[in-house]
Amino acid sequence: MSRYTGPVCRLCRREGTKLFLKGDRCYTNKCSVGRRAYPPGQHGQGRKKASEYGTQLREKQKLRRIFGVHEAQFARYFSIAEKKRGVTGENLLAVLEMRLDNVAYRLGLAESRPQGRQLVRHGHFTVNGKKVSIPSYVVRPGDEIAVRQSSRSMEHFKAIMESAAPTLPAWLSLGEDHLSGKVLSVPSRDQIDLDIQEHLIVELYSK
């Protein structure tokens, strides 16, 4: 399966907003969105106003890039969300939020979702005591996520243990050691701090 390997700051500029793909850099003056607030490419500063379809497509691409999922994966998540009870758009956001790589990021165990994805792939986390190395693994309420004992000697995790506890969304709780956490519930829309108009994505897939 193909994977984007270019500069991720181009993705943020293309969507016209910060996708927080580079951790702390996104909060500094080095952020490309702040320095060059227009799409990349030769014609980036001369783009015309987007059509209705273009607006819906950009919203879908923005959400897909935030979580780093491929087109086929995203379509699969949408199908899952559509079959669930409730509002399809909100269900979609909840399913994406409960990916293991995102939960690692939300718990403060990774500086960004891409880093969370890498740490999961390298086998640094357990779910309910069992090692899981699949970033797309979807956790459930009651699941406990923790850094493996053999990985806690890494400088990255040592720094987390010594730092102050991060501010967590209400659907997660953090352990006293800062290296473990628990999923309390499925996140509701008001607990997901993403600047996404999910109804546009639903309209796009409904065509």
Image (spheres, rainbow, N blue to C red):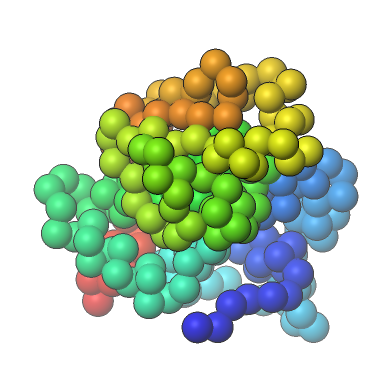
Image location of residue 136, percent across then percent down: 42, 59
Q: Residue furthest front?
A: 150
Q: Toward the viewer: 50 or 88?
A: 88
Give the side of residue 103 with respect to residue 167, left or right.
left
Give the side of residue 50 with respect to residue 8, left or right.
left
Count of number-bearing discs: 0
**Residue drawn at the location 69% of the way across and 75% of the way down:** 5
| As drawn, 47 above or below 69 | below
**Residue drawn at the location 40% of the way across and 45% of the way down:** 130
**Residue drawn at the location 53% of the way across and 33% of the way down:** 107
Task: Determine the image quadrant of residue 72.
Answer: bottom left
Quarter of the image for the C terminus: give it: bottom left
Task: Determine the image quadrant of residue 137.
Answer: bottom left
Q: Toward the viewer: 21 or 126?
A: 126
Residue 197 shows in this picture: no
Image location of residue 126, percent across then percent down: 46, 43
Image location of residue 43, percent across then percent down: 75, 81
Give the side of residue 173 with respect to residue 22, left or right.
left
**Residue drawn at the location 72% of the way across and 52% of the way down:** 22
Residue 131 shows in this picture: yes
Image location of residue 89, percent across then percent down: 29, 53
| As drawn, 107 above or below 95 | above
Task: Determine the image quadrant of residue 140.
Answer: top left
